């Protein structure tokens, strides 16, 4: 009878490494007579917009419209030719309106906030001066359909973050070609070194009894002009 202590230990017929090598050898043998195709040297051309693509983007714009409205914001669709008239109609009848220096749309009773102006004619408005303004009008960088969020990166047509936080009404102009599907699509377009403000509806918070209070941390009213 064989002593178990002295019995030889069975050895595997192949180790994981040799099995891998065997598989790779079989793959190489199977591909041995395959001639690789020549690389296509023609430039890559972006696909032309098709009615299907245009329809898909129109659906994104509709979703963005719906989601922004869900946040109790006002959303109004218009064309570029109608924009000046819609801005005037959306603003309060009286009171000064702050605009960033780079906004190229006429705004009634506009007061320009221009950090680069040191002449004393414009310059940076103080917090008290901003508080005396009834509204602010800005452009935007991108709109996100899935979340109904508007992102500002505070380029000259959007101005400093302060001007979008102090006045009670923020009238924000978003072009339909700035609307993207979701947050990853938006971040692909944003410069992470710039200040970014993400807006999902007007400012709102709740107290300990869950009573909604608007206008505590920013504008009480968000009015979005969605421009085709």
Image: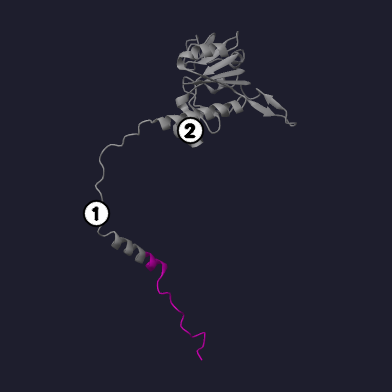
For the point 52% across and 21% down, the residue is 160
Q: Is residue 26 above or below residue 40?
A: below
Q: Main secondary structure of the magenta part?
A: loop
How many marks on residues?
2
- Disc 2: which residue: 186
Residue at 57% from the left image edge and 27% from the top image edge: 68
Q: Secondary structure at mark 2?
A: helix
The one nearer the camera, 76 or 120, is 76
Disc 1 is placed on an element classified as: loop
Query: Could you tell me how far apart the alpha carbons at marks 1 and 2 are, in whole angstroms?
Result: 42 Å
Q: Which mark is residue 35?
A: 1
Residue stretch rendered in magenta on the structure:
1-20
Q: Using the rendered view, name the quadrant where residue 22 is placed.
A: bottom left
Q: Of all residues shown, which one is farthest toward the bottom? A: 1
Q: Earlier in the sequence, mark 1 or mark 2?
A: 1
Q: Please state which of residues 191 and 140 is positioned toward the viewer in this rendering.
A: 140
Marks 1 and 2: which is nearer the front?
1
* Residue 185 in picture, x, y percent from top left: 47, 35
Instruction: Give the percent coordinates (x, y) of residue 194.
Output: 48, 29
State the image coordinates of residue 166 (x, y, percent, origin top left).
60, 19
User: Image height check: is 148 above or below 79?
Assistant: below
| In-image side of 218 versus 184 (left or right) | right
């Amino acid at each position: 009878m064989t002593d178990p202590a002295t019995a030889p230990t069975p050895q595997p017929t192949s180790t994981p490494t040799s099995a891998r090598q065997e598989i790779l050898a079989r793959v190489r043998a199977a591909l041995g007579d395959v001639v690789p195709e020549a690389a296509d040297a023609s430039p890559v051309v972006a696909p032309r917009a098709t009615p299907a693509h245009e329809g898909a983007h129109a659906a994104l714009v509709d979703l963005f419209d719906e989601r922004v409205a869900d946040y109790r914001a006002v959303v109004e669709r218009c064309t570029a030719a109608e924009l000046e008239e819609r801005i005037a109609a959306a603003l309060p009848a009286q009171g000064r309106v702050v605009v960033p220096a780079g906004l190229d749309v006429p705004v009634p009773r506009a007061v320009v906030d221009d950090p680069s102006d040191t002449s004393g004619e414009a310059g940076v408005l103080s917090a008290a001066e901003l508080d005396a303004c009834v509204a602010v009008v800005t452009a935007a960088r991108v709109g996100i359909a899935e979340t109904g969020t508007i992102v500002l990166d505070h380029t000259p047509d959007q101005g400093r973050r302060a001007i979008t936080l102090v006045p009670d009404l923020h009238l924000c102009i978003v072009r339909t070609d700035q609307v993207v599907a979701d947050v990853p699509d938006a971040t692909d377009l944003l410069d992470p070194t710039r200040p970014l403000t993400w807006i999902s509806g007007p400012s709102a918070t709740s107290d300990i009894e869950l009573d909604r209070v608007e206008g505590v941390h920013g504008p009480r009213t968000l009015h979005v002009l969605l421009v085709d």
